[in-house]
Amino acid sequence: MTEVLLSCAVAIASGVASTPRPEMLIRLTVDATPTPKPALRYLLLPELKEMTQGNPIPNYLKCVLDQESTGTNAPFSRFTLKQVDRAARMDKPDWQIMPKLKTDGIGLLLPDLQKMRQLASELQARFRDEIALRRFDDAVVTAKTMFALSRHMADHPTLIGDLVAIAIAHVAIGPFEEMLGQPGCPNFYWALTALPHPFVALDKGMEGERTLIDAELRGLDDTNPMTTAQLKKMITHIQQLERQDNKVITWLSDRAKDEKHMEAARRRLIANGIPAERLELFSPYQVLLLDEKLEYVIHRDEAMKLIPLPTWEAIAILDKLQPPKGRPLVDSLLPSLHRVRRAQGLLEQRLALLRHVEALRLYAADHGGRLPEKLSDVAVPLPVDPFTGKPFRYERLDGVGHLRGNAPKGNEDNAAYNLHYEVIIRK
């Protein structure tokens, strides 16, 4: 049985002082279960032999639209969810929004994202029904569909799409944990090990972020002098992004009078490839806006270059970045990459902890139902905690295994970032 609680528990770690800390406690009573034979009988993403050619995205959306056309709030039909299963096994996801991404900028409307959440919710309900009936083979089909939906969502070229992908993966993990607690549930250690790492990549979302901002600033010319009307239109647009009337024009007016600032701005633009003789033709406001765009791009890339690093390295450096305050474009356009990277890390941590749970089940199967005293006793490889780069905290108390993840700095009091798996082997 799986029980998820938010509690104010005592964080216990060897050699570390005990401190009250809110936790998300996930209580699992599980069987001691060995590896299935063959070892990869159960996987958590569709295999190549299951795949068909096609774009899953319009097929997902058609399922939602067909349901909406009935004019009821009834659960999705069995037939509709089978169509979702088929879509999840198509091989070429394409959200088909690149043209609008390049023109609409951050005003791009994304109604499809909510429809994907709706699909995940409907699939979760089916997943739970299958688990309750211990139809594990059917439940694995649904798990594959949900995890594939999450991966397809990660192909959305926005960071918002990445966050929805992460959320859908968490929606799938909830019933998956419940399945582990069912008598007779197979062991998924190698299935979890086979999942991609990271499960939700951020590369397309970051590229989309760059494209969105290029669309917002496409009216800012670095090749020809801009007219007064063009500059006024650009300034008005930036003020709308800032949502503060006259802040940008006041900032520009003050800096245009500061000869030292103007000279430094020209030097930066020349160093970045704009010829000095061309800059001489630009008005002070055009020079300042171009310099602000350069400042934004520099600070954006300082953050984006860190994203591929291991989670514990990326977050530590991201937290130290201090973009300048009071700069129009930097203030309004820099993405909160440290938050997105934390969300990605939390999903990786939860999957890694589940892999530990299954490793404990493997150990118990080989040791008469007894859990290990320490993680180093486990024979299979174990991933590190993504937030520390070190082994997870583990202890056995009165025959019960306690696995804990570590919260990243700044999230120590957030229960969602203090995962605690309590593992009991069913007698």
Image (cartoon, grey):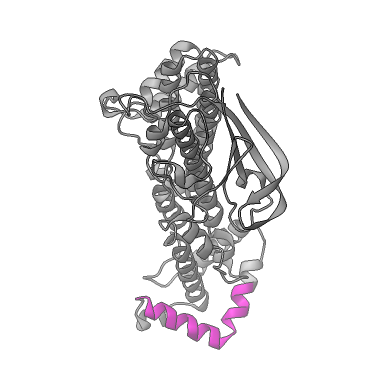
Where 390 falls versus 358 (above or below)?
Answer: below
**Is residue 160 visible in the rendered structure shown here?**
no
Q: Which of 153 and 413 is in front in this view?
A: 413
Q: Is the magenta stretch mostly helix, strand or loop?
A: helix
Residue 123 is inside the magenta segment: no
Where 286 falls versus 6 (above or below)?
Answer: below
How many numbered marks does the figure carry?
Answer: 0
Residue at the spot 34% in from the left edge and 76% down from the top edge: 273
Q: Nearer the viewer, residue 141 or 35?
A: 35
- Percent from the top left, x then y, of residue 101? 43, 46
Drawn side of residue 193 relative to residue 217, left or right? left
**Is residue 370 visible in the rendered structure shown here?**
yes
Residue at the spot 48% in from the left edge and 31% down from the top edge: 364
- Percent from the top left, x then y, of residue 70? 54, 12
Residue 272 is inside the magenta segment: yes
Residue at the spot 51% in from the left edge and 41% down from the top edge: 353
Drawn side of residue 217 relative to residue 121, left or right? left
Q: In which quarter of the image is the C terminus?
A: top right
- Percent from the top left, x then y, of residue 220? 45, 65
Residue stretch in magenta: 251-273
Where 309 falls versus 251 (above or below)?
Answer: above
Where 287 falls versus 5 (above or below)?
Answer: below
